[in-house]
């Protein structure tokens, strides 16, 4: 049984995620792919205030890199899109695992009932025929005829059919254009796929649970289940098998209820942590970074009570529209609400909130300032504006080093 302090568990998580040290001096496209492989899953979100989430998650790990590399990896077939934690980019070698998931859910599809597909079978046939005859399409290539509009709840029938067929595995995302999905037949996007490579359900669940614990360093069953959106029952069964075979090791985390499990690959990392190796990286995190996407886990490990407020009415927001947690070492020391004004070259920090019980000194302020300026420079918005700091007592120290 491995007994871990909260500091040990945080250090393991950050090391497993590639966030314990600053990125390499010169980032590469292969480095982008390696970062995705290390995380196992790169969640997609379209909100574009600072940078769209997948690009920001990669920047947090790699430092300055070319965002187009992510787009190129998708177009080259070295990564693919599917539903994992949520809509996600995934390493192409993991396609067999998710093909199993497609097969298991393909009769219903994501968010859509079989009844909808039956009622709209003419639209589905039209989409299939169009793709066979004309090649890849975007939802925007189909003109809306019913006069309706709006968000996902108002999708036109062609968009719904494309998403259903994508969820069921008939279609894949060939590439993205201005971040819009371009759909094509699976046979054209992945011509080498052989159904004989499809793993069993048990192997799929076991492998994904092992990946999840490895990506988290150490995890409870609930944390592992959340990573790839698996049921607790199938996660528990997989953990039992993995412990029996020695791939997962029983553990306990200080003040965290329930059993935890350490991936055997992290044994040397844990030993180094106990010899004094501690995280030293300072950066900004996306709200959809694996470090914080499980809000209960972030609270348990970091004491960060965090939520994204972009869906909260403005008068009720406490921290801001799209606040970014600030990571320094193994602590989440604050959060900032920022907006990149690319034409003007300004990185506006609308507010910066320090977390309670964080003692701000000159060294910590310098690290926070360094993270903000690095993010601003990557965006091509080198002029930083700082509007508001909470608490007020921290404003002088932070303004002195940020501005």
Image (cartoon, grey):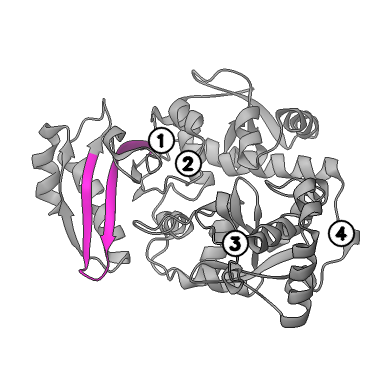
Name the mark nearer the viewer: 1 or 3.
3
Secondary structure under the numbered disc 3 in the rendered image: loop
Q: Position of residue 56 (x, y in %)?
A: 42, 57
* Tag 4 residue: 197
- Against 319, is 204 above or below? below
Q: CA distance from mark 4 to mark 3?
A: 43 Å
Q: Is residue 341 magenta?
A: yes
Which quadrant holds the C terminus? bottom left
Badge 4 local density, few (<14 within 10 Å), some, or many (20+)? few
Name the mark nearer the viewer: 1 or 4.
1
Instruction: Residue at 19%, 43% (x, y): give it.
Output: 365
Q: Quick check: 143 left or right of 335? A: right
Q: Position of residue 68 (x, y in %)?
A: 47, 72
Q: Which mark is residue 146?
A: 3
Q: Which residues are magenta?
A: 330-352
Badge 3 local density, few (<14 within 10 Å), some, or many (20+)? few
Secondary structure under the numbered disc 2 in the rendered image: loop
Q: Is residue 39 magenta?
A: no
Which quadrant holds the N terminus? top right
Name the mark nearer the viewer: 4 or 3.
3
Q: CA distance from mark 2 to mark 3?
A: 42 Å
* Tag 2 residue: 291
Q: Quick check: 299 left or right of 229? A: left
Instruction: Residue at 36%, 48% (x, y): give it.
Output: 281
Name the mark nearer the viewer: 2 or 1.
1
Secondary structure under the numbered disc 1 in the rendered image: loop
* Tag 1 residue: 307
Task: Name the residue furthest right.
Answer: 196
């Amino acid at each position: 049984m491995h007994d871990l302090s909260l500091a040990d568990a945080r250090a393991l998580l950050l090391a497993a995620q590639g966030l314990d040290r600053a990125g390499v001096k010169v980032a590469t496209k292969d480095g982008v792919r390696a970062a995705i492989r290390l995380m196992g899953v790169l969640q997609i979100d379209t909100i574009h205030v600072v940078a769209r989430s997948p690009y920001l998650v990669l920047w947090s790990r790699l430092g300055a890199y070319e965002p187009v590399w992510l787009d190129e990896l998708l177009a080259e077939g070295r990564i693919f899109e599917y539903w994992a934690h949520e809509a996600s980019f995934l390493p192409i070698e993991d396609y067999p695992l998710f093909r199993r998931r497609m097969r298991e859910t393909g009769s219903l599809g994501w968010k859509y009932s079989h009844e909808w597909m039956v009622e709209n079978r003419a639209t589905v046939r039209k989409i299939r025929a169009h793709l066979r005859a004309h090649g890849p399409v975007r939802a925007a290539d189909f003109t809306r005829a019913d006069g309706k509009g709006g968000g996902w709840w108002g999708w036109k029938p062609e968009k719904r059919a494309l998403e259903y067929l994508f969820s069921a595995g008939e279609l894949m995302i060939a590439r993205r254009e201005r971040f819009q999905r371009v759909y094509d037949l699976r046979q054209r996007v992945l011509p080498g796929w052989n159904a004989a490579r499809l793993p069993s359900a048990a192997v799929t669940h076991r492998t994904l649970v092992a990946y999840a614990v490895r990506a988290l360093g150490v995890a409870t069953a609930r944390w592992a289940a959340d990573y790839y959106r698996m049921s607790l029952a199938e996660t528990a069964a997989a953990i039992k098998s993995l412990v029996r075979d020695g791939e997962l090791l029983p553990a306990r985390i200080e003040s965290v209820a329930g059993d935890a499990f350490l991936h055997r690959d992290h044994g040397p990392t844990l030993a180094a942590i106990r010899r004094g190796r501690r995280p030293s990286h300072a950066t900004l995190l996306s709200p959809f970074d694996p470090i914080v996407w499980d809000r209960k886990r972030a609270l348990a490990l970091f004491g960060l009570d965090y939520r994204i407020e972009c869906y909260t009415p403005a008068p009720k927001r406490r921290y801001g529209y799209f606040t970014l947690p600030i990571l320094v070492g193994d602590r989440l020391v604050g959060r900032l609400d920022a907006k990149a004004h690319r034409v003007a070259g300004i990185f506006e920090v609308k507010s910066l909130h320090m977390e309670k019980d964080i003692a701000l000194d000159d060294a910590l302020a310098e690290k926070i300032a360094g993270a903000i300026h690095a993010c601003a420079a990557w965006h091509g918005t080198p002029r930083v504006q700082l509007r508001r700091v909470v608490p007020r007592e921290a404003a002088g120290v932070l303004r002195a080093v940020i501005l």
